[in-house]
Image: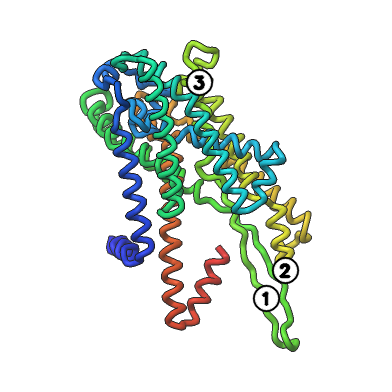
């Protein structure tokens, strides 16, 4: 506990990190306030009394932090932007023009971001009328659904999503962590205390009693620990660097051993977010269509398709994130090699083989965690708490929290390293070498 308090003090001492954390918290607060502002012309009391937040609608409301069920100006949340990002990344694999932009560096990234924003507006323009029709109007939540009300409501919903996207980008650029992922995580965490308290009351007054509630908490923390182990799991590929003679034969440098850390879950939480964004389509289209079976997250069809998409997106995102050929070329250029493997093409094939082998169990684990809530409900756990026993919410929370903590730790290590260098101590270099081998 003493060390934890000391770490908090160290965070507060670093001015840049302190400012970034305060900015992040401030922008998150603005996002949360926006989720409570109801659309003009909406009768929230009637909406609350007649709303049905079961199935995938409840899941969408979970990601939006309750904004979906409140008919808030942030009701669509950040999901349209994520859907647009998915489409742009898929286009990057098939369309030469987008591929060219991806290779143009910072200028290409700005162009892709611009197209992603435009595509986000288009997606919102389709989702907003569906949301108003299927959720607000059908539940009797509109005082007077005139043409003007429809027009203003659609524009406000689009603006709310674009504002949430802007907040996320500002957090990423000026704050701490990935802004888009943090906004989703905050929305999920906002529902967590209520879900735990609701499960406590249900067990205290119903079947199972307190013993069953304690067992559920133990299982919950066990799932968190296993998830952390998989998310943090790394396969270290040993790398040797050839010695180089400098000056005379007695002076040589190099010959060091390092490692390439290939994560079991190299794609992080993005496959879960991508898959979940696509699974919102059946709800927007409607339960009466042939996709209606996918609108119930407890159905076999929903969980099977959801798990399959997570596995596919895990391979897809890992493929676009890690380039074995580029790693092999960088190693060859710097005089590094994998022991027993020839530099160049064979090294790239070797890294690709290892990556495929560790991604396979990693993707199946993500899929298994994602469908745990459906099984939890079969064992009598309440819907609200079951959503946190695994599933998308668990993976997003663990992944984003670990990523944010790692970024804070990096700031602290960099600050510590600068302080050592200013003091002129040689052991600062030794510490740098130790971290480079991780």
- Disc 2 vs disc 1: Cβ atoms closer than 8 Å? yes
Q: Determine which of the numbered discs, if any, sits on residue 254 in the image.
A: 1
As drawn, the label of residue 282 is 3
- In terms of depth relative to the viewer, which is nearer, 380 or 108? 108
**Which residue is disc 2 drawn over?**
335
| Residue 167 shows in the view | yes
Name the secondary structure under disc 2: loop
Q: Nearer the viewer, residue 314 or 143?
A: 143
Q: Is residue 132 above or below residue 321?
A: above
Furthest residue toward left: 205
Q: Residue furthest top?
A: 288
Q: Say what secondary structure mark 3 lies in.
A: helix
Bin the neighbour count of mark 3 within 10 Å (Cα to Cα): few under 14, some 14-19, many 20 and up.
many
- Residue nearest the observer in this picture, 79 or 60: 79
The C terminus - image quarter = bottom right
Q: Report whether 122 appears left or right of 17.
A: right
Task: Provide residue 368's location: percent of width, then percent of height.
Answer: 51, 34
Viewer-nearest of discs 2 and 3? 3
Where is the N terminus found, in terms of image quarters?
bottom left
**In the rendering, at what x and y percent does residue 47 appear?**
29, 19
Q: Judge depth for marks 3 and 1 and give the one in front.
A: 3
């Amino acid at each position: 506990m003493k060390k934890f308090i000391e770490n908090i003090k160290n965070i507060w001492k670093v001015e840049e990190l302190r400012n970034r954390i305060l900015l992040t918290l401030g922008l998150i607060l603005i996002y949360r306030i926006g989720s409570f502002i109801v659309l003009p012309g909406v009768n929230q009391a009637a909406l609350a009394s007649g709303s049905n937040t079961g199935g995938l609608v409840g899941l969408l409301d979970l990601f939006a932090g309750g904004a979906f069920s409140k008919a808030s100006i942030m009701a669509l949340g950040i999901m349209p932007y994520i859907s647009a990002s998915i489409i742009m990344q898929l286009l990057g694999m098939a369309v030469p023009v987008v591929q060219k932009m991806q290779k143009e560096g910072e200028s290409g990234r700005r162009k892709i971001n611009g197209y992603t924003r435009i595509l986000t507006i288009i997606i919102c323009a389709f989702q907003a009328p569906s949301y108003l029709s299927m959720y607000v109007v059908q539940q009797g939540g509109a005082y007077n659904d005139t043409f003007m009300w429809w027009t203003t409501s659609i524009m406000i919903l689009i603006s709310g999503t674009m504002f949430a996207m802007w907040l996320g980008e500002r957090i990423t650029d000026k704050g701490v962590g990935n802004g888009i992922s943090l906004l989703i995580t905050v929305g999920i965490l906002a529902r967590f205390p209520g879900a735990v308290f609701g499960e406590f009351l249900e067990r205290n007054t119903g079947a199972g009693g307190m013993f069953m509630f304690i067992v559920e908490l133990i299982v919950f923390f066990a799932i968190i620990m296993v998830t952390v182990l998989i998310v943090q799991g790394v396969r270290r590929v040993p790398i040797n660097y050839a010695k180089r003679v400098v000056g005379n034969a007695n002076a040589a440098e190099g010959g060091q051993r390092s490692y390439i850390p290939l994560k079991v879950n190299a794609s992080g939480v993005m496959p879960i977010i991508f898959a979940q964004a696509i699974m919102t389509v059946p709800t927007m289209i409607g339960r009466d269509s042939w996709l209606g079976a996918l609108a119930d997250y407890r159905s076999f069809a929903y969980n099977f398709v959801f798990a399959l998409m997570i596995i596919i997106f895990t391979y897809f995102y890992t493929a676009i994130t890690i380039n074995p050929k580029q790693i092999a070329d960088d190693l060859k250029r710097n005089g590094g090699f994998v022991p027993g493997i020839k530099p160049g093409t064979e090294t790239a094939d070797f890294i690709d083989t290892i990556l495929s082998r560790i991604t396979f169990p990693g993707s199946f684990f993500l899929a298994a965690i994602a469908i745990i809530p459906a099984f939890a409900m079969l064992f009598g756990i309440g819907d609200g708490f079951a959503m946190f026993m695994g599933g998308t919410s668990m993976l997003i929370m663990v992944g984003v929290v670990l990523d944010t903590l790692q970024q804070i730790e990096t700031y602290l290590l960099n600050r510590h390293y600068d302080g050592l260098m200013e003091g002129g101590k040689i052991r600062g270099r030794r510490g740098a070498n130790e971290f480079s081998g991780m």
